[in-house]
Image (tube, rainbow, N blue to C red):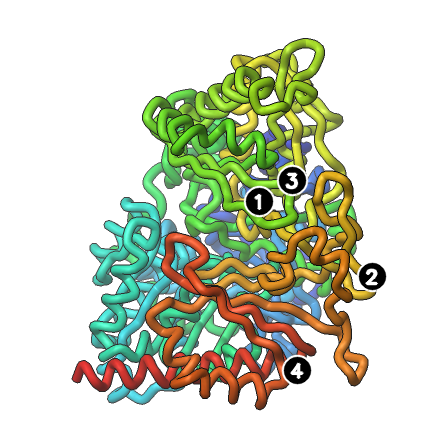
Amino acid sequence: MSTDTMKAVVFHGPGKVTVEDRPIPKIQDHGDIVVKVDKTALCGSELHVFRGHQPSGTGFVMGHEFTGHVHEVGSAVKSIKVGDRVVSPFTTSCGECFYCQHGFSSRCTKSLLLGSTALDGAQAQFVRVPTADGSVMKAPSSIKDEALVLMADIFPTGMFAAKNGFKHSTPEEIKESVVVLIGCGPVALCALCNITDYQPKHILAVDSVPSRLELAKSLGAEPWNFQTDREGLDQRVKELTDGRGADIVIEVVGLSPALRMGFELLRPWGVLSSVGVHNGEIPWTGSEAYGKNLRLQMGRCPVRSIFAEALESLERHQDKLGFMADKMMPLSEAVQGYDMFDKMKYTPTTLNTRSTLRPTPIRISRSRHSYNMSAEDSQNSAGNANAIADQLDRLNVDGEAADVTPRTEQEYAESQLTLRAIVSSKEAGVIIGKAGKNVADLRDETGVRAGVSKVVQGVHDRVLSVTGSLSGISKAYGLVAKGLLDGAPSMGMGGVIRSDGTHPIRLLISHNQMGTIIGRQGLKIKQIQDASGVRMVAQKEMLPQSTERIVEVQGSPSGIEKAIWEIGKCLIDDHERGYGTVLYNPAVRVQPGAGPLTTNNGGAPTGLSSGRSYNRTGHGADFSDSPPSTFQRRSGSDAANRPPPPTHTEDGEEMQTQNISIPSDMVGCIIGRGGSKISEIRKTSGARISIAKAPHDDTGERMFTITGSASANEKALYLLYENLEAEKMRRSQAQD
């Protein structure tokens, strides 16, 4: 290697990185600096690109987390000199635009993303940093390199989340506050360190991964596993707050259910601080937020704007965060590092053996980034950089992307997931069996939880849900296929059996995960078919009011079991793409203006179409566009003789339908004596409100169906929730 070249980790496509000679970067603008890298990181964002899960350009130097010493400075640089030890955010900032000047550097108009086709990254012996005065900062000698690399994004984002939660409270209020932290991944644990600085009365940390909850406990929080004890979590928050709800909720997951959980745990006038990126709809209505006087802060952390404050905090907490990285290796072994990280031979680690060429270790870090780049990223536009950086911040449900993906067959076998399939009513009868015997036997034999959705009048489809380990699920679907094959003739379904003596299984797969199952140029789906002997056909269109598609698997029971095993492995590897999926819910749906419903010879309604979707899944609430239950219960002949339900109000506004679930023990307070309260709500809002006579599932909640214009429904929802809150307050006071 000549004195004009350096070693750098270069991305050449999925699964292909090399350590190669590259020219040492030069000053290109008067505001540039060139940094000799001391330590850099290999984190989850690089792993996503390496695995091909995220499209990306090629030929650029990887890496966006680093610390080092200044090697060269441009003539206009004022705050940094040669020899200074510096640290940088994962994006550059100009320091001069409106947003930088006002402390909003995450929206800098000239921002560039390190480790992209727009700007070579820091997995190299040298890195060029543009607009250095607005980007890098001198690093205190008291902070170790291993901790400093967290300053690129992870630690400042955690501090930002905590700061936003407390900034509206007085010291006296903070001392009496109850804080709920949702998520216990790396950013959340950095947030927890900062939360403890404020010394609130009580901190609860919520996650579903026991090891993370143990880390949260060691940092001073009371751990709660929401998957195993959500009801207990609710009760604990009420117990600590005299029934009001948490004063502050900090959400660092980036998924709609997590945000909804935080909203439900929060008291009126509470603060919800969210730093996770949410790509879907916000999981509450305007009426709910209005009724709670919600105080909300969302968005990407302005890392550079809070750098000085974050460095001070990191100096206090660095010794607590040693678990973030535990293995070091030289840059020359980066290819092996990617391979080890990809195959999870190490948990996220720190590598620190000195290179024989230049002292540039590469660190494998506990990170949770994911970003999406394309060839267009080479355009050096700030809008592009900010859009990519927003995606770079995305969290999956576990709070990190890389270190939970299983790799051995045993790890796959033990991994937990849910796999759903569409079945007809007759098929459901075979699966359930007389008095539920078949499905009970299925559970006993495989150890899974299995069930079939309830019958919806006029709807042919039902949904089979199987939850458990992948080994149990694949075996269960093999048994289901055999049961359908054996039981179909006796149920009058002989026509379903193909000429080769097989019965199809129609799986429900998230649209976002279909690419993983199909693979590049269809190679993965071909591999699955070759390995199992089945035939697979994927529908192109998503099912109504959902983001799921059907994958039909046709083959012998043993072949289906093998295919499910391979499909499950794909879903586990790409689990983060499945978060936020809108599940298909078989229901009668009417499109405004579609005309009256008629029935075909089989009695199933025709003239149906999917309407606008309002589906949101949350604890105790289901918002959908399904028509009122009274309309769904009509028989075919009755419906044919009745006029269609109105699709527009008298003022010409489109009629909409929303469903909410309310605990049965709270229904009486909404109905009122002799129906007085519900009548008043109907009259005031102008919406029609019907109430189910019995709970709709085992949650013990009853369905309220609200039909009217958008404004009428909004008013009705507000009044309903206002009554609920008033009743909750009355009961809590009565307990006192």
Badge 1 density bin: few <14, some 14–19, many ≥20, Cα 10 Å: some
Q: Disc 3 marks which residue?
A: 4
Give the numbered dot on residue 711: 4
Say which residue appears at 52% left-offset and 61% top-offset: 622
Q: Nearer the viewer, residue 454 or 276?
A: 454
* For marks 1 and 3 on the same chain, the one whose residue lies earlier in the sequence: 3
Q: Looking at the image, do the residues carrying marks 1 and 2 touch, with CB atoms under 8 Å apart?
A: no
* For marks 4 and 1 on the same chain, the one whose residue lies earlier in the sequence: 1
Position of residue 654 in the picture relative to residue 458 (left or right): right
Q: Secondary structure at mark 4?
A: helix
Say which residue appears at 72% left-offset and 53% top-offset: 637
Q: Amino acid at mark 4?
A: Ser
Q: Disc 2 marks which residue?
A: 595
Badge 4 density bin: few <14, some 14–19, many ≥20, Cα 10 Å: some
* For marks 2 and 4 on the same chain, the one whose residue lies earlier in the sequence: 2
Say which residue appears at 18% left-offset and 81% top-offset: 735
Q: Secondary structure at mark 1?
A: helix
Q: Nearer the viewer, residue 622 or 169?
A: 622
